[in-house]
Amino acid sequence: MIDHVVASAQSAAASAAASQKAFSQVSTAKGQPAASQAVAARVQTPEPQPAAMSMEAAAGVNVFSKAYTQRTRASGDQRRQYGRYLADSRAVAGFRSETKSMLYPIIGAKGLGSHMTDVDGNHYVDIAMGFGVQLFGHTPAFLVDAIVGHVTERGLFLGPQAHLAGDVAQRICRLTGNARVTFCNSGTEAVMTALRLARHATGRNRIAMFQGSYHGHFDGTLAQAGPGGSTVALAGGTPPGMVDDVLLLDYGDEDGSLEILAREGASLAAVIVEPVQGRRPDRQPRAFLQRLRELTRSTGTALIFDEVLLGFRVALGGAQAWAGVRADLVTYGKIVGGGLPIGVVAGDARFLDALDGGAWSTDDASVPRGDRTFFAGTFNKNPLAMANAQAVLTYLEQQGPSLQDSLNTRTENFVARLNRVLTEEESGISVHHFASLFRFAGASDLFYNHMIQNGVYVWEGRTCFLSTAHDDQDLDKVEQAVRASVRAMRANGMLTPARRTTALTASLQSIPTTPSQQALRMLAAFSPQTSAAYNQSLVFDFTGAPDINVLKAALCGVVDRHEALRTTFPEDGASQIVHRRLDPDIHIVEFDRSADDQASFQAWVDATALTPLDLEHGPIVSAWILRLAADHHRLVLVMPHLVTDGWSMQLMALELAQLYNAGLGGRPSGLQPPFPYRSYVEHTRARADS
Ligand SMILES: Cc1ncc(COP(=O)(O)O)c(C=O)c1O
């Protein structure tokens, strides 16, 4: 029998703070962080935590990390040498204690075509491709000629108007169908400027954007869902006022979002949308974008297509051409600069005219219109960037739409190949793509480390790209690296098994997340380790040996009863998927420390609770049955705060005890059907919306 019902139930964060707490008393997750605190914690690096992997995986990581750090020693040395001087967010992305020895950026020495060489002299097939900039591969001859030719003939100088700016603007208009264009130096600046133009032209302050999109790092778009339907800043140092005027919408909930927009549209200056989100390439809502166009037109709201990532990649005319939508404003960057910094704001003269007063002539009585706004930048229309952009646009125009079409088809076939490999290997990983952009879903940081070790370079943001320079041999090499990586990981216990994603797809149901779940899910996507600090743990004490089979059945029974416990959370945070069955992960562990060593037991629980759960694929409940002595066992349950709180943990504990005790006696548990989780979610969302 379970004799102590709930030994202790606490969040991992609270648990870490109270490691000496007695676990024979009933306690709930007091002081557990609220969702709004989760927001503030989003960009915090967690304190180093004790290793909490399986022994096998930890040993595997140890061996692998020696090989990895040896092979990329010069990259690691740079971080060690310059880390104290170079403040580098990239160097800390995805931090977790278990893999921190491998956490340093690979330093590039040279890039040519589809290949990159690092400072250690390792050669890679590069599928980061300059974060999506290098559509033609690294160092294409026509771009080298453009830059060298420019510097040789004209020098490296700034001040007068760049002589190619007008021509580049005209070419962009011709290829994309936009009426006017202006230049800045990054996608972020382009987004910031487009929003300013929309607000200026409409005289409205509010804007709408979608969950899961990335629009760069301008404070005005660093927003995420807060408690009660509010919008809060995504990062420390962004004053709340910067996002007060931001309305956040679900990108997955087309009807819901359009309904809100129909209601709120008259007060909105703009709706900014990443037509296919870089983090969710599988979601391609063309019909939704067309409906969005109609709606924004009817409410006088500017529709902004953020095509910094997709422009010139998905089609020659960009995402507008793909979606069959003419936006009011469009932002570009990346590809069009050919490797040099650039941002482009393009669109309707109604908006762009605010920069120069619209069409007027020096030869007649016309004057610029007075209703202008401010815009400037030392490096705007940088002559070198203009020379490169002219070469990119000339090349694209010469090649015609078949360049994008054939690269898209090539990527589609390649991704299908990778998915076959990943399924054959039962890896639990899959690949999604849009155009020539693709992302691995369900892959851990260790997978990417293995890819690098196997000669394929992937950057810290993980979005991958094919370029026109990738040939068949390169694709073969990437496929081999994928296979070798998952095999090596499996051999060393580092791979999460695939059973539930393959077996359960027929029984899925998707429901929207609540605002506080969205905040927690975003936290998990950004920093799994920080998110794990919100995990909750529950400890049970058994005097005598439990009947393991009955206990397992009771655990599965509790999970079966509650949809929340068999839910997974796709990376975008907008929806959650309820599985018909999603059995918990159950580990049986021989606990080799003495049973009465409370401190070492508590340290183990703390470390275990801080292990990130696989929210995307599940199971989201992990259980450890610890044998401390022949007559003393403990059961430790860990689950995310996304679906549990102190009250529901207590309930779970009671149900588990009832199911277990009934199972031992071979009688029915007598438990009543639980309150449906879906109703709770609907209720919470309705309250947030009201
Ligand atoms: C869709 C989108 N918008 C804006 C940006 C910001 O561009 P940049 O990094 O050039 O500031 C990015 C960058 O990846 C992007 O993907």
Image (cartoon, rainbow, N blue to C red):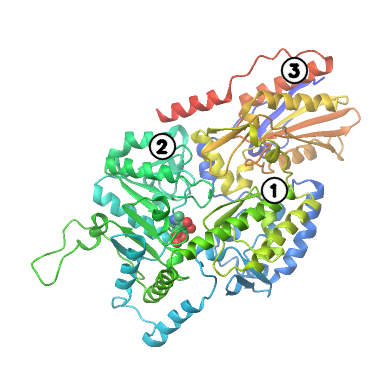
Residue at x 38% of width, y 37% of height: 258
In the image, what residue type sits under mark 1? Gln
- Find disc 2 in the rendering and name its residue: 257
Q: Is residue 83 left or right of residue 285?
A: right
Residue at x 16% of width, y 59% of height: 369
Whole-percent x, y for residue 320 in the image: 39, 54
Q: Earlier in the sequence, mark 1 or mark 2?
A: 1
Residue 269 sits in quarter? top left
Q: Is residue 61 left or right of residue 545?
A: left
Please name whichever residue, 241 or 431, is drawn nearer the observer in this view of the structure: 431
Q: Earlier in the sequence, mark 2 or mark 3?
A: 2
Q: Any atom of ligand 1 within 8 Å of the CB at mark 3?
A: no
Residue 230 sits in quarter? top left
**Ligand 1 image position (quadrant):** bottom left
Task: Decide: is 69 above or below 145.
Answer: above
Please name whichever residue, 656 or 473, is drawn nearer the observer in this view of the structure: 473
